[in-house]
Image (cartoon, helix red, strand yellow):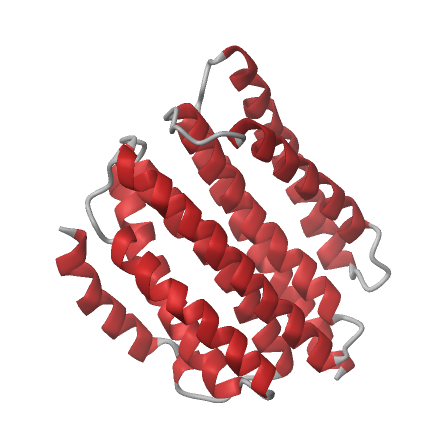
Amino acid sequence: MLSRLVPTLLFGLALLCPTAWAGISDAEAMNLSGMQRMLSQRIAKSYLMIGAEVRSEVAIKQLDQSVARFESNFIALSEYAPTPQISAALMTASDTWQVYRELALTRPNREQSVRLLQLSDQLLAQSEQVVQLIERHTGSRSAHLVNLSGRQRMLSQRIAKLYLAVSWRLPISGLEEELLKVTEEFEVALQVLLAARQNTPQTREALHKVEAQWRFARAGFRLSSDSRYVPTIITTTSETLLWQMDGLTSAYEKIMQQDA
């Protein structure tokens, strides 16, 4: 089903994406490379949603769009790559991506989910390396905010992915501990962003909205302590967090552009 639909969708969206046509700036590269981290987790989250029958129709669309966007981002970043180290890191991630994409587009089941989550973590680590290399290359003081805000996008999807894996009771050790760890990472990073001196009145207001949404999401995590899982609520609130943080990342990208 998915394997037949996505190649056509992927090809069309990749052609329509502006980043696949034109060269991108350092600030745009920071944003897109950070987005690759998020997509590595969003694809796995969508796969688990389909397998666990949690808003399956929505998840199929998310999976299709995420695969297509990862491809178009990769094209743009490959054309941008200003150093041999960044090019090499992109190619390493590409090797994992080919295997991950093929598995992600198969019909979800519990057995394959274990391998899929391993690949999603591997691709995340490789994408993180690309982000770090680009940040060091730019030398921009504001690049760290684009990086950190973009990482919050990833954490919103990683949290949802891990929550689904726990609630679906996948046979992977340490899932609950990792879920606790990433929720704390999100909290700490949110406080760092709130304290950033580069914030404008608009970014402060947006961050306070994220903070309110985050408090609501954490209430759902507490419900799972007695095995009363609420995956539909968590996937919905994490989606709101994703788009809130995506808007903030774009705002920090503009600040970085102004500092250039």
Residue ID at (54%, 24%):
220
Quadrant where the image shows the C terminus: bottom right
Residue at the outermost top position: 226
* Residue 48 placement: quadrant: top left
Can residue 240 be seen here? The reply is: no
In the image, residue 55 above or below residue 6 = above
In the image, residue 13 above or below residue 150 = below
Percent of width and height locating residue 140: 77, 77
In the image, residue 18 above or below residue 241 = below
Left or right? Give the position of 151 relative to 107: right
Left or right? Give the position of 171 relative to 51: right
Residue ID at (53%, 39%):
159
Percent of width and height locating residue 77: 49, 79
Name the foreground residue: 84 vs 48. 84
Name the foreground residue: 114 vs 184. 114
Residue ID at (35%, 45%):
115
Percent of width and height locating residue 244: 58, 50
Name the foreground residue: 161 vs 238. 161
* Residue 108 placement: quadrant: top left
Percent of width and height locating residue 149: 66, 57
Q: How many marks?
A: 0
Name the foreground residue: 133 vs 1. 133
* Residue 64 placement: quadrant: bottom left
Left or right? Give the position of 80 relative to 249: left
Residue ID at (58%, 76%):
28
Left or right? Give the position of 107 relative to 52: left
Can residue 258 be seen here? The reply is: yes
